[in-house]
Structure formats: structure tokens, C-alpha cells
Amino acid sequence: MTNSTNPNASSEVKKKRTPGPIRTGVVVPLFLLGLVIFLYFKLFFDANLKWGMSVAASKINGAQVDIASLSTSFTQASFELGGLQVTDKKNPDFNILEIKKISSKLLWDGLLRGKFVMDNFSILGIAWQSKRSSPGQVLPERPIESKEQKPSAAGKLAQEAESAALKEAQKEFKGNALGDLAAILEGGDVKEQMGEIRETLETEKYINSLEQEITGKQKLWEEKIKSLPNKEELEQLVEKLKSTKLDSNPLTAAKQLKSFKDDFSKISQAVKIVKEGSKQISSSIKTFEGAFSKIDDLVAQDLKNLQTRFKIPSLDTKNLAQGLFAPFVVSKLGGAKKYIDIAREYLPPKKSAEEKQKEELQRPKPRARAHGVDYRFPKKGAYPLAWIKNVEISSKSPQNEPGSTQGNLSGVGHNFTSDAQVVGKPMQLDIKGDFPGQNISGTHLQFKLNHHLPNPNEEAELKVASYPVSNFELSKSDKLTFGLKKAQGAIELELNHSEGHVKMNIANRFRQIDYLLESQNKKVQEILSSILKGIPEVTLDASAEGSWSSLHWNFKSNLGDELAQGLKREISGRVEKAKAELKKKLDDKIGPKRKMIEQKFAQVKGKMNSLLGEREKEIEAAKNRAQGALDEKSKANKPALQEKGKNVLKGLKKKFKF
Amino acid sequence: MTLILKQIFSLLKMINSETGTNQIAAGIAFGFILGMAPGFSLQTLMVILLALFFRVQFGAVFVAAFFFKFIAWPFDPLFDHIGRSVLEADSLQVILTSAYNLPILPFTKFYNSVVMGSGVLSILLFPVIFFLTRIMIAKYREKVIARIQGTKIFKAMQATSLFKWYAKYDKLY
């Protein structure tokens, strides 16, 4: 029996065969798995994704969402969606939104680095409220859980911005310039229009407070004067000086004189204290006197407030233009800020200088992490996390459909990115087009977000070559409604925003104007009609600068100039009369009190000056008397002292036998 | 799960046999790399693929990864320290910057101090673990298995019909 025929021998040979280090058996299963995955993505993935997206979008929308075609490519990293139709669930015959084509292409170069870099992203053929070929299916309504609807962060920002702008508008531009003018124009009694000043004015409040203060100050000054050294205290010292006789012994007398000199210096010190105290009180009185000058400022402020309250109009051209156009322009501000805030939130600008220093090419400071720290090694020209290099959008308006809100728009955008610093280019959007259904033509909108610069800023520019204006009310009151019934407008708007500082310029032109002018008073109607006939074109130039919370507006309009000039001829005398009448009322109300307080202060001032003068005079007199007495004593003691000296000298000569 | 259990039983069987020392040692060394790495990253996948491609005992990989995962966390400060030293080394800045901006490589998360530290340390210790495991398996077989096989209980168990039936089943399958 040979080994070849023996089965046991064969199995022994098999056992001896040692397997190699590579697991060859795993290659085939892995290959098969890869093949299955490849075939699935090649044959079924697009169809499954299209179905999944359609079902998910329909559920979210609550009505049928159709996707005509969808194709993806792994090798190209591209995505293309065609024929998106989103049914309007309230009106299933129409689509809320229709998009002919959405396409995007990611760069593999970026994907391999974990970055989403899109060379081109396009949304073409956008249409709203387009007719569907067949009604879309509407899904049954699901009961909605009652949750408190809270706005998103961006929505909250927008709401705050809008309310801030509107509040600002209400605060600054309330009133009705032409309505107030019309009231005067009608020629009614100025006195009747004004009524009485019933409220307590600011000036009155101030005068009352001054009165209380004067009483307090008077008490204070009097106490201070009392505390100063008086005549009685000094008289004692003066009397001591005068009455004390000098001793016959010259040396004792010299000692007495020294004591007198000390007393005199006390008197001099007292005089000094009185003079200084007097100076302080006079200074305090003078300072207090300055408070009276504020009364004039308050009177002017009260007069201005009363003019507004009693609707006494201003014929200043700037104010008139502001009164006419400001409420309309400012009320549109909320919308503009909303988009800037959203852009800042989602497209963050450059970080602070310190952060920049850390994150730039130099070694950055590591960011703390739960386990370890992540280091960054960025390089200029590298990809940011997300970057859409080019964006293309377009929409088409249906033909011959008046009133349609859709437009023939086409736009391009560049460099939409999560990190403009890395890209080093501005984010731009440029949209042009017309809205034929709305009779709007030559629209051109440009946005430029310079978040790549050291000082990030945003620029926006809007131009509309022609747009219709109808029933644009500029002024409305019981007396008068004034505005533009029909006109053709053109607008150019420029907006610059940087670090909370806004600069805006608006240039508006209205042509082919049919004015809206309604007044119950024929005279008013005639006067204003004749003025408006000479104004075929209305211009409105507005500029604003400052922070969003306090914008400083400047309005200029030929309408304001023309109206002011025309109206000045008619009513300037009456306006001036009304102002004079108001001033008189104000003076009548405040005058007596003001006079009283001024008189009271004058009395107090006089009294204080008199007291101080008297005290100074008395104390000075006492000092002079003391000085006289001291001089007299010194003079009397001088010969005795000389005689004594001579005797002492003689005695010494004798002693030493000179 | 069944696959993992099957691999673990296979490990137990192999460790008690006289073959597969290198496969077990390599499996434990691969498992050491997996266990030391924090979280899941590209190199984790690469180690699994290598373990799949080479004839490495997979049960040993799983068991070792599980074991080292538990004992690795106290060493995180050490990994962090080593990682920082490497990532902050001036001489490596050019290489690291290039690597950071290369395709695929950033998916390894090498820029994280703990990942870098644990990676460097586990790769350096890979041969140490491999040879240490080989020695330990040999010692285990020499001392423990031989002693157990010499006991009366084991000999009595070998004489039972159940053991014979299992031995036959094991031989056939």
C-alpha cells in the first residue's frame, strides 16, 4: 500500500501544510461585498434617494412633493435634482414653489480633507404659485401639539431690530406736518387752537426746587456767618491791650509787650478767618446764582414741547421733508437690519485680533477638549469647512399674467463660506431682473459681505429703474390727506454697515405724478393745488448715519422746499402769531414765579452781603484799635529800655576799669 | 455577536493548543493599538483591516481591545503630554502643517494630543507587546496547561464519553 492510496497518509500531508501570514480567504468575500455595494449605488441608490426625499418632503409639507429626476455621482461628487414641485396644500392645483433644476458639485479634493467645497451651486427656474399639470395630493392633517411658539435666534434678532427701528421712527418722527399746516391755513382762531397750558412745566418744577434750595442755602449761610469770629470776642483782647499798664522795670515791660503781640496775632488770625469765610460764602452765592441761567434753557425747551403739543407747524424746509417722508422710510428699516443680523449670525465675520493672531499661520493656542486638545495647522489657501465658490439662481415669470409677484430674475453669487478669513475673498451676491406682473423694471440688487477684511463690513446696493407708486399717503389728518395717488418711481439705495455703524443713502425720484389731495376746506385745496402744479417731479434724498438704535436722519426733498415756500407766503404770519401767543402764555404761567424767586434770591443775597460786610468792617476796626494800642505801648517802653541799657554799660566799664 | 463569541472561543481553544502563538500575540498587539486609541478614527479602521488581511487571531484582537480600552483611560494625561510634545515640536511643524492639509490624513485625528500620544506610544510598544505575549503564552502552556493535564480530575474527564464525543466532533469540524 502506497502513501498515495492511503487516506490517512493524505490527511497527514494536509495537516502539515502551514497557512501563510496573509488571510487569502477573506479577499473573495470582501470583493463580493464591494461589488454588491457598487451595484446598489450604480443601479438603485438614485431611485431610492428620490423616493425617500419625495416621501419625507411630502410629510413635512403636508402635501405632495414631486421630484422628476435625481442623479448623483460618487466619482464626480455631484448632485442634480430636476423638476421639484411643492404642492400648495391650501390650493392643490398650484405649487407653492417650483424649481426646474438644482445642481451642485463638491470637490473631492476638499472632501478628502473633510471640507465641503462646492465649485458651483445653481438653483434655476424658480417659480412661485405655478399651475400644476394635475392637482397634488394633500395629506390628512395631523393634530398639532400645542407648544409655545418661540422664534428662532435669527427671528428674534429680526424682531428686535424691527421693533427698535419702529420705536425710533415713532419717537422721532411723530406728528403730521401738513395736517397741522392745513389747520393754520384754514384761518381759524389761533387762540382757540392752542387751548390752555394745564400741565406743570419743567421750568415750574425747576423754580419750585430752586425756591426750596434758596431757603436751605440761606439757613446754611447764616449759620456759617454766625460761626465766624465776632466783634465781642475781639473787643476783650483790645480792651486788655489798652487797659494794662507797662511795668516800670523795662525787662518786665518787654515781657508784657511780647504777650500783647501774641494777643494781636490772635486778632489778626480772627480777621483772616472772617475774610476767608466771607469769600467762601460769596463764592457759594455766586455759584447758586448760575443756576438761574438754566431757567432760560428750560423755557426754550418748554416752548418747543408746547409747540409740538399745540401742533404749531414748522415752515422749515428740512423739517417739512422729514415730516412727510421720514415715517415711511424709517418704517422700512427693520427689514434691512434683519438681513444683516442674520448674515452676521450664520456667516460670521473675522474674529478678534487676538483670536486671529492665534489662529493664523503661527502656532495657535490649543483649544481645550474633554480628552486632550486639538491643534490646528492652517495654511493660507487651504479650504474652509464649507465653501460654495459660485452660486447661480434664476427665476422666470409666467407670460402675460398681470398682478403676478414672480419675476424674471437671474443672479450670481460668489464665495459663500463658513470662514471668509481662510478664503480671503468677499462674499458677493448680484441679482438682476424685472417683475413684469408688478410693472417693476431694472431691479439690481448687490450684496457684498467683506468679512475677510481686518475690519469686517457689509455693503448693499439696490437700484430700481422704474416702479409704480399708488396711493402713497405722505400726510393724513382730519383736515388734510396728502400724497401721491399715482406716480412712477425710481430708487437708488446704498447701505454700509460696519461694527454697528450704519451709513445709508437713499435717492428717490417720482415722475408722472398724480397728486392725492383731499381737504374739506376749499381754500386749503386751492392753495395746495396751485403749489403742486409747479412740482412735476418729486425728489427725496435721505441719508442716515449712526448706530441702529440711534440713527441721525437727514431728509431733503424738493417737495418740502416748494411746499414750504408756497405755504410761507400764506401762513407764515399766522404761524408767527401762534408762536408769539404761546410764548405769552408761557411767560404768563412762569413769569410771576420766576420774578418771585429772583426777588427772593436777591433779598437773600443782599442780606448775606450786608451781614458779611458788617462783620468784616467790625472786625477790621477792632484790629486797627489793637494795632494802635500795641504801637503806643511799644513806643512808651523804648526810652526806659535805652536808659536801663546805658546804666548797665556804665556799671560794666567801672568794673573792668576802662 | 455570534461571530465575536465564536472568535473568543477559538482564542481559548488556540491558547490551550500548541499552535497559533504568533497569531495570538499579533492579535493582542493589534488589540493593544485599538484599545489605547481614544474613540474611533481612521487608524482604528486601518488596524481592523490589517487584522482582517493578515492571519491574526481575531478573538485576541477583540479581547485585547476590550481589555486595553478599560485600562487606557488613566494613562490619558501621559498620552496628552506625549502628544503635546510631538505636536509642539518645532522641528515637526513643517511636516505637521503639510500633513494637516493633505487629503485623508486629517481623518486620523493626529492633531489631537491624546490621539497622537496614544498612537506614538502604542506603535512603539507594538513589538514589545508582541514578544511579551509570545513569551507569556509559552510559559502558560508550559506551566499551567501541563499541570492541569497532569491532574487526576482532568484525566478522569478525558475518560468520559462526553469528552470523547467532543474530541471527535472537534477533530471532524
Image (spheres, grey):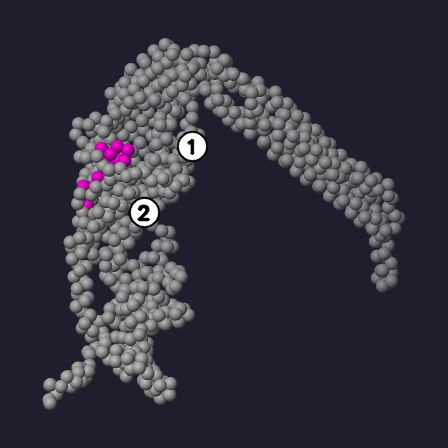
Q: Where is residue B95 in the image (x, y as percent from the top left)?
A: 27, 67
> On screen, B165 above or below A479?
below
Secondary-structure class at tag 2: loop
Q: Which amino acid does label 2 sit on?
A: Leu
Residue at x 25% of width, y 59% of height:
A113
- Mark 2 = which residue? A347
Span highlighted in magenta in the image? A80-95
Q: Position of residue B74 (x, y in %)?
A: 42, 70
Residue at x 76% of width, y 44% of height:
A266
Disc 2 or 1, which lies upstream in sequence? 1
Is residue A118 rendered to the left or right of residue A267?
A: left
Q: Where is residue A337 in the image (x, y as percent from the top left)?
A: 35, 38
Q: Is residue A78 visible?
A: no
> On screen, B103 above or below A332?
below
Q: Nearer the viewer, residue A113 or A24?
A: A24
Q: Nearer the viewer, residue B151 or A655?
A: B151
> On screen, A429 above or below B59?
above
Q: Name the quadrant containing residue A379.
A: bottom left
Magenta stretch holds residue A92: yes
Quarter of the rendering occupied by the C terminus of chain A: bottom right
Kindly identify which numbered label has been placed on residue A602.
none
Secondary-structure class at tag 1: helix
> On screen, B164 above or below A574?
below
Q: Position of residue A59 (x, y in %)?
A: 28, 43
- Mark 1 = which residue? A167
Q: How far separated are the C-alphas under marks 2 and 1?
A: 28 Å
